[in-house]
Image: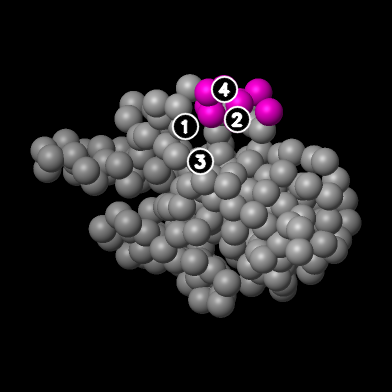
Amino acid sequence: MSKLYRLHGRAGSRIWKPLWCMRELGIVEQAEISDVPIKIGRTVEIFPGEDDKREYYVNNVNPNGRMPTLEDLEKGLTLFDSAAINIYLCKKHASELAPKDAAEDALCTQWAVWGAFEAEQDIVLLMFAQMMKDEARKKARTTELWDKLERPMNALNISLGKSGEYLLGDRFTVADLNAESVLDWGLRVPGYEDHIKFNYPLAHAWMTKIRARPHHDANQNA
């Protein structure tokens, strides 16, 4: 049976987000997974030492040179950015996770942007800060990053106080999937959950409920 999708990425990276979405939609078996080797240094290099493959990927798959990337082989569409991929898949498959009207569509976009531009970078930096060998510098850097995360985490906590169980109300949607997947990067940080539970209790309860879903992969592995 031919596959409907080709999903490019590397296990343990952001590919786990669309894979989680595909599991929720029951379509993961319809995707061919194409491995994208990476080398992490000051920057993330794709296809290290394989210039021809990197050039092909950039020119023919993802001009942004990042991952994950989704090819919809049925529609001839290529998408990059994990949140955009997830919104597209939920809409295409007419899932309950998809927005039902223009207002919900806007909210799904809002929380995708919140994750990408307000929260993710500092959460990832918080994770990398734990690798610092100097304990004083590590503590100072960790405190600095938690201070920077106060505004977006407050936004999430306050919003959940108004919306209810989930970001769009009483049902789990792609808005929750995209936003919560960003917060999961911090699970490797000592004291991360306790900090969120104490300072942002509604956000913590929301995270806990979502992470208990059978298709959630807490280890962020493909």
Q: How far apart are marks 1 and 3 (CA)?
A: 7 Å
Is residue 76 or residue 194 the one in the foreground? 76
Residue drawn at the location 56% of the way across and 77% of the way down: 214
Q: Residue at x 53, y 23 (%)?
A: 52
The label shown at residue 46 is 1
Determine whether 211 is above or below 37 in the image.
Answer: below
Helix, strand or loop for disc 2: helix
Instruction: Residue type at mark 2: give it.
Output: Tyr
Mark closer to the chain start, 3 or 2: 3
* Residue matched to label 4: 55
Q: Please name the amino acid that badge 3 sits on.
A: Val
Labelled disc at residue 57: 2
Graded by Cα atoms within 10 Å as few (under 14), some (14 to 19) or many (20 or more), the crowding at tag 3 reads many
Residue 115 in percent (x, y) is at 57, 45
The answer to whether residue 95 is left or right of residue 175 is right
Amino acid type at image mark 1: Ile
Residue at 59% x, 59% y: name it: 19
Q: Give the range drawn in magenta.
A: 52-60
